[in-house]
Amino acid sequence: MNSFASVLKKKKILIFGAGFSGKKIAIEMRNAGFEAFTSSRSVKYDKWSFLYDSNNNDLPPDELFKGVTHILSCMPPNKDGSDPLLSKLENKLLDLDLEWAGYLSTTGVYGNTFGEWVSENDPANPIQERSKRRLLCEEKWINTSLPTQIFRLPGIYGPGRSTLDSILKKNIKVIFKKDQVFSRIHVADIANAIIYLILNQNKFAFYKIINIADDNPCSQIEVIRYSYKLLKMQMPEQIDFEEAKKNLSPIALSFWEENRRVSNALLCKKLGYQLIHKDYKSGLQNCLKHLKLTN
């Protein structure tokens, strides 16, 4: 990414929501030559952080917006379905001379397709309330005059947040559900796909909605089995879903209520992004390397 630095002089991005994905995106943005600032709700962690809490009306100072060329929101919707960034700063954003705006959403907006493939051309049909709120926020972003791209993400994992970590923390249930598949994406590919699209924004058509997913939707039990193999540990006996669901929380249970394969054909075939981690095996091997480095 360092080769991009000269191309990206004077590019400044504000990233609202510095969680797992937001932090990684900020790091990769800086490596690519951006000035990348991230929001915090309570404390300024370093020179790159700024305070923003829409609930308490803690808004960034005006000088922060000087020279901003890009905006990315990684913030979840408010409980009423409103967007925590647009609800407070939409007019401010509209006054900026933005080259690009991004919003991280979820493939949950597609709902349950019973294992069938979904693409950006398929209608949204969310069944979970949280996904319905996401769709409302997507529509709000698209209906602004900002140059917005919506990124629909499946299950996100990476170093510090993977099945490897869950196994080592003894915080995993080995559940089997017949014919159930999930799509997933390594956090490094979220960051690098977004940077790739920004850098190539003028080279191809501007798509407002893009899925970022790997090439290999598969069952959760397949991922867990491979994780135990990487850790050289014995996998416990699997639990059938019908038995396991009796002890699952509502949020955990909702995870199993949707079954779909998410297509990345637009991103990878039409727009030409090359995945760093094409499947969970590559991604988990990367997570394992980080585990070894930190232990």
Image: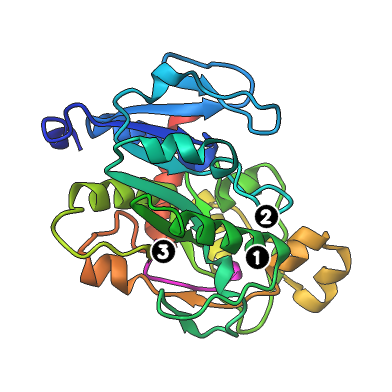
Query: Element type at marker 3?
Result: loop
Q: Quick check: is 217 in the magenta stretch?
A: yes
Q: What residue type is labelled 1?
A: Lys
Q: Is residue 51 above or below residue 32?
A: above
Q: Name the residue under label 3.
A: 213
Q: Position of residue 186 (x, y in %)?
A: 43, 53
Q: Where is residue 211 in the image (x, y as percent from the top left)?
A: 40, 65
Q: Which mark is residue 148?
A: none
Query: Which span is picked out in magenta?
Result: 212-221
- Answer yes or no: is residue 4 visible: yes
Marked residue nearer the N-terminal end (3 or 2) = 2
Marked residue nearer the N-terminal end (3 or 1) = 1
Q: Which residue is drawn at 88% across and 69% down?
A: 246
Q: Mark 2 points at which residue?
A: 81
Q: How crowded is mark 3: few (under 14 residues within 10 Å), some or many (20 or more)?
A: many
The answer to whether 25 appears left or right of 82 in the picture is: left
Q: What residue type is labelled 2?
A: Gly
Residue 86 is drawn in which quadrant? top right
Q: Residue at x 71, y 46 (%)?
A: 170
